[in-house]
Amino acid sequence: MSDCDTDTNTNQKIKMPQQTTNTEMKSSTMQTRLKKSGQIQKKKYTRRQICMWIIAGVLGMCIVGGSIVLIIFDILALSNHPFQNACVDSGLWYFVLTSMCWCILSFARGLLGNMVTIKSLMMDVGLMVWGSIEILGAKDVAIQQTTIYRMALIHVLLNYAIYAVLVGLFCIGLYVA
């Protein structure tokens, strides 16, 4: 049967309703009921919410990109073997290796949803202290001009910056509450 049939008495085409299945009928009546009751609403985002989502996305991409670049430069600095042989008493090479491994583990832990624990904070503070001791202990100018020294300095400064932001947010949270 077609959508239009002809009435034999008047020779006019009559529009026949399309046949719907039982589930389509239930679905359409349910949607009609929900629309009447006001339960289905399109979520409208304000400009401020959209801006915050954009900023969060850009910040997230910057953090991921920065972590990848940091790991690449760590690998390049660690592959400079003459430093390890020339500066036997310095622990900068081991510090950068440990920091790089911890950065990879922290990134993986964040992807898995296990963000911050007391153990991870203690590890970060321990690495920050160890790095500070190694940086301040490197008095030789030849060491200070190496890539490994610069990477160790970047790790220590990033740790200090992250903890300064965390302490600042904590203090703001206490002030607002």
Image (tube, helix red, strand yellow):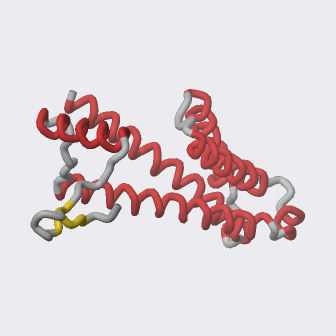
Q: Return the x and y of residue 62 as percentages of the image width and height.
A: 47, 63
The answer to whether 147 is drawn above or below residue 91 in the figure is below
The answer to whether 28 is drawn above or below residue 44 in the figure is above
* Quarter of the figure with residue 120: top right
* Quarter of the figure with residue 152: bottom right
Seen at 59% across and 32% down, the residue is 122
Nearest the viewer among 26 and 93 is: 26
Seen at 55% across and 30% down, the residue is 117
* Quarter of the figure with residue 140: bottom right
Q: Return the x and y of residue 16 as percentages of the image width and height.
A: 23, 58
Q: Return the x and y of residue 46 as percentages of the image width and height.
A: 17, 54
Q: Quadrant of the N terminus?
A: bottom left
Seen at 66% across and 43% down, the residue is 130
Is 45 placed left or right of 169 in the picture? left
The answer to whether 85 is drawn above or below residue 39 in the figure is below
Seen at 34% across and 34% down, the residue is 170
The answer to whether 146 is drawn above or below residue 56 in the figure is below
Q: Return the x and y of residue 177 as percentages of the image width and height.
A: 21, 27
